[in-house]
Amino acid sequence: MTHTHPAQPALTDAGEGDPFAPENDALYFLPLGGSGEIGMNLNLYGHRGKWLMVDLGISFADDTMPGLDVIMPDPAFIAERKDDLVGLVLTHAHEDHLGAVQYLWPDLRCPVYCTPFTAAVLRAKLHERGLATTVPIHEVPLGGTIEVGPFSVEYVAMTHSIPEPNALAIRTAAGTILHTGDWKLDPEPLIGRTADEDRLRQIGDDGVLALIGDSTNALVPGSSGSEAGVRTALTEVIGQHPTVRVAVSCFATNVARLESIARAAAAHGRHVALVGRSLWRINEAARSNGYLADLPPFLTEHDAGYLPREKLVLICTGSQGEPRSALARIASDDHPQVSLQRGDVVVFSSREIPGNERAIGRMQNQLVSQGIQVITADDAPVHVSGHPAQDELVRMYQWVRPRVAVPVHGEQRHQQEHGRIALGCQVPEALIPSNGDLIRLGPGGPARVVAQVRTGRRALDGKRLVPLDTGLMRARHRMVHNGAAVVTLVMNGKGELITAPQVAVMGLVDDASDRDLLLDVVDAVREAVAEMPKAARMDDEQVRNAARISVRRSFNATHGKKPVTDVHLVRV
């Protein structure tokens, strides 16, 4: 396996003489998100001076990012070259593949291509941002082919934990790429098609330059399992608890799982209610595209209150411990219409996304402390992954037989293992990319990293997007760990304090019980200013600095903390 970098990182300036403009005869791959990490997928292919984007996703902020909701890759590199961006192709409707479109499309303003279910999910998201009629969405039929600039893109049916997942056969004059997207091999997916093995074999027979592939489960031996097995397990679990209310939490986008839960509930004479806005959004998108057609309408959380507990199954958002999700509110007894009682059962029909373990554990402990039984995939086979395990990766390489394997969609350990599997399948080359690696795939010679571009992240902070590599988050972290203080000084033209300093402190003291301590801080500020030479007291910046230092020294002496301190100085 190779992962080499150029001796001199390149600049990202676009415009005349752009050093990154793709050569006419070469084919390039550039991940800006989703390599070395799970989530935030943003991939670019370059050929004949043009760029094609595949996916534009988000990841969710964790406890280390106070105040933030979602994070996403910074598209600055391609936004500077948007005139050469011929389109955005979406492989499927998961958040880590399309969730950033609603935030970042205004920087790109390119056409968007996707299959009907993905289009329905995307339109609902765009509607929330007022972009529903602005973004040009081109629906592509299942198995269809589009011509976009110098790229011909064929959609190849795959199986995953959402309807209409697609691999992309991207054909250029320099060679063919198979971009797998997220996939697995499930002989009984229950909803949607099975992976199109015959087409994948044919693409392999025609010759594939590189396979850009999902690495999420490369460390998992065997196969990922079938949705049919999950339906059987859910039916058994619900049947084992005939007298109590059962709630099931799963990824909202897993339409096959929604159907499995509904079928399992019906087998025991129970109705099903959806609890959580994202579940209703996916239900609408699914039914508008012909999925779930054989199921009766789901009940609302309001309707659920009129049914006996043993006649109902709840499907709830919140399998990842999201603080504002339906299940989190139920666990904290804060949901306005739905509650659980001692003896009830909550089934987690999902996996833990790395980084969410603490939030999930906290919520599960809340449930258990109330006498509610929690069942996870460790207790019963109530979940299977949507990503390929090792045996499935081997089968894919046997069908496609690329010259180069480029593992993406995983952390380094996943990518490295994926690369080893590819080499074991007689793939001549495996190159492990990081975000920002500009890779020349061909033609001719080994695939190699020829340059690096700057990458970054943006975050949704309330209603605005902010870069994560600025002082904003550093200041917020300092406030979280050290608290904050605001000092107000009123001085006359002679440099004298005409009233006692005012000190307000956040996150360090209790104003009521620590009044004496605050008075000591006020005295420290007064003394620090009084001891300054008269000339220094006439300089606003020197006064502010002296007051700031005195506050930080005071709290460091008493609390071992140095609060972020702002000083307001008024001259009268």
Image (cartoon, rainbow, N blue to C red):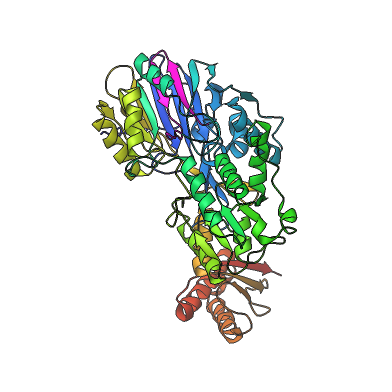
In this picture, is 557 found above or below 73? Answer: below
Expressed as whole percent of the image width and height from the top left, the position of residue 418 reads 32, 37
Q: How many marks?
A: 0
Who is closer to the viewer here, 212 or 561?
212
When asked about the image quadrant of residue 247, the answer is bottom right
Who is closer to the viewer here, 355 or 258?
258
Q: What residue occupies the far bottom of the structure in this picture?
A: 516
Asked whether 566 falls inside the magenta stretch, the response is: no
Does residue 387 show up? yes
In this picture, is 564 found above or below 87? Answer: below
| Residue drawn at (63%, 64%) of the image | 340
Expressed as whole percent of the image width and height from the top left, the position of residue 140 reads 59, 22
Does residue 47 show up? no
Left or right of 212 in this view: 382: right
| Residue drawn at (75%, 58%) of the image | 306
In this picture, is 342 found above or below 278? Answer: below
Who is closer to the viewer here, 298 or 331?
298
Left or right of 348 in this view: 213: left
Expressed as whole percent of the image width and height from the top left, the position of residue 161 reads 51, 39
Q: Quadrant of the C terminus?
A: bottom right
In this picture, is 542 found above or below 144? Answer: below
Q: Quadrant of the N terminus?
A: top left
Asked whether 175 falls inside the magenta stretch, the response is: yes
Who is closer to the viewer here, 28 or 401?
401
Expressed as whole percent of the image width and height from the top left, the position of residue 179 reads 43, 27
Stretch of the chain drawn in magenta: 165-187
